[in-house]
Amino acid sequence: MSPFATPPAPGAWAQLHDRLRGPRVFRKNVREVGPDARAGGLVAVRDGDGEHLGWALFHPHSQIALRLLSRTEEAPGPEALAARAQAAAQRRLTDPSIPDEVCRVIHGEADGFPGLLVDRYGPILAAEAHSLGSVQLFRSIIPALHEALGTEHFQIVFDERSARAEGERPGTKRSDGAPPFLRIEEGGVRYELDFARGHKTGFFCDQRENRAAFAALAAGKRVLDVCSYTGGFALSAAFGGAEEVLAVDLDEDAIAQGKRNANLNGAAVARRTKFVHADAFSYLRQLQRNEREFDLIVVDPPKFVPNRRAWDEGIARYHDINKLAIPLLAPGGNYLTCSCSGLVSALDLQETVRRSARLAPLQILRKTGAGPDHPVALDFPEGEYLKALWLRDTRARAASAEQP
C-alpha cells in the first residue's frame, strides 16, 4: 500500500514565519507545526498569515524541515505521484539526446520529487534518497516507473549522511532477484556496476557528455584522471586512443573495479591504463617531484562542500587540488576541472581555479554541466550541482623530435 494512499490528518500542518521562498524550508523558518505532523509524512504548508501554500514532506529533526511536494489545494495521492513519475520517464524516453538504457529518470526537485534521485540502468532502477520522506516517495512510484520504462528491479539507498541529518537509520533495500552486478555500455566503453560497493546509484551518468568530449581530445595524448572512481574519464580517454592514461583514487574498491572495467574493454585499453590507489593530494605532489607532464588532465573530486558549514574547508580543498594538478599540464594541453557541490556556483569554481592557477597561462574554452536528463528547477538553482570548467594552456607545444 502506498504511504500516500491515506489523506493527511487535519493536524498535519506547518506554518512558516513569513512566505515560501523555494522548495526547501529550513527548520529556523518554521514557526509552528500541527500535532499530527509526522517524520517522513505530508503536511499542509501555510505562510505567516495562515494562507495555504501547498504540501511538503516533513521531518522535525532535519535542518531542511520541509521539502515542497505540491502547490495544490488537495494533498497529492498515489495516482498523482504515479502520473508525475511517468511523465518524468516519458520526457527522457522522447528526448533523442538521452540514451534510454542508462540515464537519470527522476532528478529531485526539478521533476517534482524532492530529495529523490533515480537512475535507470537497463532493467534496474537505482535510487538515492536524501530524506525519509524521499524513501516513501520512491516506494510509491516504483510500479509506475516499471510500467513506463519496462524495468524489473530496484535498489534504493538512504545513505548515512542523509540519515544522520534526520536522526534516522541508513539502509539499502533491493527487490527480490535484483542482480548485484550489471554491465552497461556508454559511448562504446563497457563498465561493470557493483551495486553493493558503488557510490551513489552505482555510476555517474551526469558526466556522460563530458566524458564524450574528453575522449574526443584524447587521441595520442598522455592523460591524467584525478579522483577517477571506477574509471569513467580514464577509460573513455583510453578508448578514444590515448597513448597512456594514469587514474588515481583513494577508494580501494573503486580502483579494483576500475581495473576490472579496463579488462572488459580489451587488452589494448587495459595495457594503456594504469590505476593507482593513493591520496590524490600526496600523489600529485609526487608527480610534480618526478617532473611528470600530461597533455590532458581531468580533476573530478567528490563533493567537498556538502553543506554551508563546510564551505571554507571545501573551497580550500578545491583550491589545493587544482593548485597541485595545474603544474602537471604540458604546454598546449587541455584541463578539465569539476565540482559536484550544489552550493558552489560556476563563478565560485572559476574564481577558485583562478587563484589555484596563479600565473599559469590558461584560457577558458567553455563551461558545461550535467546532461539534459538532469534538469534544474527554476526556483532551485542548487539543483545545478555539477559544474565543469574546460581550460587550455596557451604555451606553444614543443616541436616533435621526429620533425626535421
Image: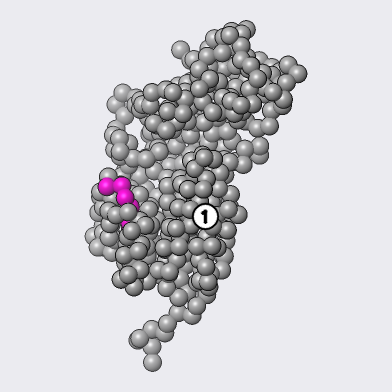
Category of crowding for the residue at label 1, using alpha-carbon neighbours closer than 10 angstroms: few (below 14), some (14–19), many (at least 20) = many
Q: Residue at x 52, y 60 (%)?
A: 353
Judged from the image, the secondary structure of the residue bearing numbered disc 1 is strand
- Look at the picture and state if 21 lies above or below 97: above
Confirm whether the magenta stretch covers residue 249: yes
Q: Residue at x 57, y 61 (%)?
A: 366
**Location of residue 215 by image quarter:** bottom left
Percent x, y for residue 181?
29, 38
Number of numbered labels in the structure image: 1
Image quarter where the C terminus lies is bottom left
Instruction: Please say whether residue 69 is visible from this viewpoint.
Output: no
Protein image colouring = one colour
Is residue 136 rendered to the left or right of residue 364? Answer: left
- Look at the picture and state if 395 lies above or below 23: below
Is residue 148 rendered to the left or right of residue 21? Answer: left
- Look at the picture and state if 226 lies above or below 134: below
Instruction: Please say whether residue 65 is visible from this viewpoint.
Output: yes
Confirm whether the magenta stretch covers residue 250: yes
Percent x, y for residue 229?
35, 49
> Residue tagged by mark 1?
388
Percent x, y for residue 223?
37, 65
Q: Nearer the viewer, residue 379 or 84?
A: 379
* Identity, as a three-letter code, of the amino acid under mark 1: Ala
Percent x, y for residue 290?
30, 71
Q: Residue at x 52, y 45 (%)?
A: 311
Query: What range of the chain is rendered magenta?
Result: 247-252
Q: Nearer the viewer, residue 223 or 132?
A: 132
Q: Residue at x 57, y 40 (%)?
A: 383
